Amino acid sequence: MSSTQEHSIIIIDDEVELATLFKEFLEMEGYDVLSFTDSLIALEYFKETSSNHSLIITDLRMPGLCGITLAKNVRRINKNITIFLMTAFDISDLQENKDFKEAEIDRILQKPIQFSDLRKMINNVLKE
């Protein structure tokens, strides 16, 4: 079984409090975590370090690049990374969206997110 330190996670949420909260929680779980509040800066960072990360957790609605556009760009750089998309909005028509399909989102997380559920999802994905 892999150790959690082998997996680096990037959190992207334009709300500073949420980005910080997720980062602190995942660090307490033993993961190496970077958080960004600017999706454009996060993408630039990822371009330089794409092979160092196992998971990106991004918000859907953000200034700059929305989570779907960010995910599409990430997929062009690294097809193998796992991407979770967080949203507090209705997702009923999201999966039919052309851009969403191209982004190949691995999982949609509906806000508010329970940390116990997040822990299970991340552990399942990263320990496969």
Image (cartoon, helix red, strand yellow):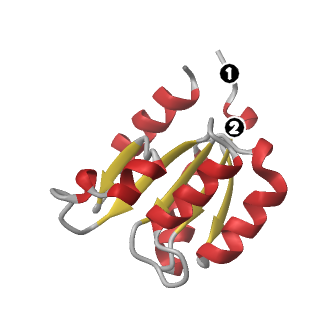
Q: Position of residue 98 (x, y in %)?
A: 34, 56
| Residue 85 x/y as whole percent | 41, 55
On the image, the x and y values in percent for residue 29 come to 58, 42
Furthest residue in direction bottom, as rendered: 63
Mark 1: which amino acid? Ser
Helix, strand or loop for disc 1: loop
Please identify the quadrant where the N terminus is shown.
top right
* Residue 23 in view (yes/no): no
Rendered position, 80 above or below 56: above
Identify the residue shown where x is 59% and y is 77%: 37
Q: Residue furthest top?
A: 1
Mark 2: few/some/many CA within 10 Å (<14, 14-19, 20+): some
Regarding mark 2 in the picture, which secondary structure is present there? loop
Quarter occupied by residue 38: bottom right
Q: Which mark is drawn over residue 13?
A: none
Q: Which residue is mark 1?
A: 2
The residue that mark 2 highlights is 7
- Compared to 60, does 76 lie above or below? above
- Relative side of 2 to 56, left or right: right
Q: Residue at x 29, y 58 (%)?
A: 97
**Residue appearing at x 51%, y 79% in the figure:** 14
From mark 1 to mark 2, how far is it between C-alphas? Answer: 9 Å
Q: Amino acid at mark 2?
A: His
